[in-house]
């Protein structure tokens, strides 16, 4: 597996609450990769929480930071990256995501609602009914998430370890030929 990816970064995309960070950490361990989380990096660099950035500077400013962090990370190799759910919105971000393998963790709305019911760290979810807001966001973003190399539907019963096992089986099937000379 280590050789098949040949250092290629793995980007996890998907809605808030889909498990990108939890799954990313386990996947990184299994691949002997480093793990990074764009939201965590943004908070560290700005010395503010995501809530503070949204409240004080607005979403557009957060998106700029997100793109800048992604650009920096894209120079790394051998890294699993848990991205923020909205990273797919900016077309320019795709030029970096495309340099790696992009995986959409496609979790159903009911599971997201269950996981995010008591969360207050996501500014986009503060003002509206959770199910309605998540359904709207998913509808707006679905066609972008679908541009991933691997789409992994997640069910209520999957443990993070189950999901990582599935990914480890899928990844070799989706390595682009230019990154795997054995397939040429
Ligand atoms: C966002 C998702 C969050 C965070 C910010 C905006 C979104 O990250 O980047 O609150 O637009 O979906 P997670 O997907 O890690 O929760």
Image: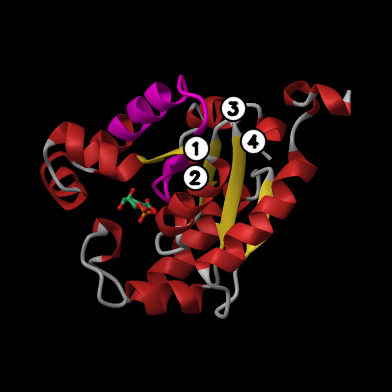
Q: What is the CA distance from the residue labelled 2 to the residue labelled 3?
A: 12 Å
Which residue occupies 76% across, 21% down?
178
Instruction: Give the crowd class for mark 1: few <14, some 14-19, many >=20 residues within 10 Å.
Output: many
Which residue occupies 80% across, 27% down?
177
Q: Which residue is mark 3?
A: 7
Residue 69, placed above or below residue 116: above
x, y (%) of residue 140? Answer: 51, 55
* Nearer-N-terminus badge (4/2): 4
Instruction: Give the crowd class for mark 4: few <14, some 14-19, many >=20 residues within 10 Å.
Output: few
Nearest-to-viewer mark from 3 and 4: 4
Q: Which mark is residue 33?
A: 1
Is there a contact, CB below 8 Å, between mark 1 and mark 2?
yes
Beta carbon at label 4 within 8 Å of ligand 1: no
Q: Which residues are magenta?
A: 65-87
Q: What is the CA distance from the residue labelled 1 to the residue labelled 2?
A: 5 Å
Q: Which residue is mark 4?
A: 2
* Residue 131 visible in the displayed image: no
* Nearer-N-terminus badge (2/3): 3
Q: What is the CA distance from the residue labelled 1 to the residue labelled 4?
A: 9 Å
* Nearer-N-terminus badge (3/4): 4
Q: Which residue is mark 2?
A: 28
* Residue 57 visible in the displayed image: yes
Is there a contact, CB below 8 Å, between mark 3 and mark 4?
no
x, y (%) of residue 64? Answer: 31, 30
């Amino acid at each position: 597996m280590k050789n098949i990816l040949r250092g290629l970064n793995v980007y996890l995309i998907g809605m808030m609450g889909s498990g990108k960070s939890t799954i990313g950490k386990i996947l990184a361990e299994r691949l002997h990769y480093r793990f990074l989380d764009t939201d965590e990096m943004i908070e560290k660099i700005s010395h503010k929480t995501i809530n503070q950035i949204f409240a004080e500077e607005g979403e557009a400013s957060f998106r700029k930071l997100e793109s800048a962090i992604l650009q920096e990370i894209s120079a790394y190799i051998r890294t699993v990256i848990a991205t923020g759910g909205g990273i797919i919105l900016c077309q320019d971000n795709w030029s970096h995501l495309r340099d790696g393998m992009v995986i959409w963790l496609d979790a159903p709305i009911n599971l997201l609602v269950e996981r995010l019911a008591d969360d207050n760290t996501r500014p986009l979810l503060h003002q509206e009914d959770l199910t309605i807001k998540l359904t709207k966001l998913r509808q707006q973003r679905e066609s972008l998430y679908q541009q991933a190399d691997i789409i992994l539907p997640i069910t209520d019963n999957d443990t993070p370890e189950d999901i990582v096992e599935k990914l480890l089986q899928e990844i070799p099937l989706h390595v682009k030929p230019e990154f795997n000379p054995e397939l040429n």
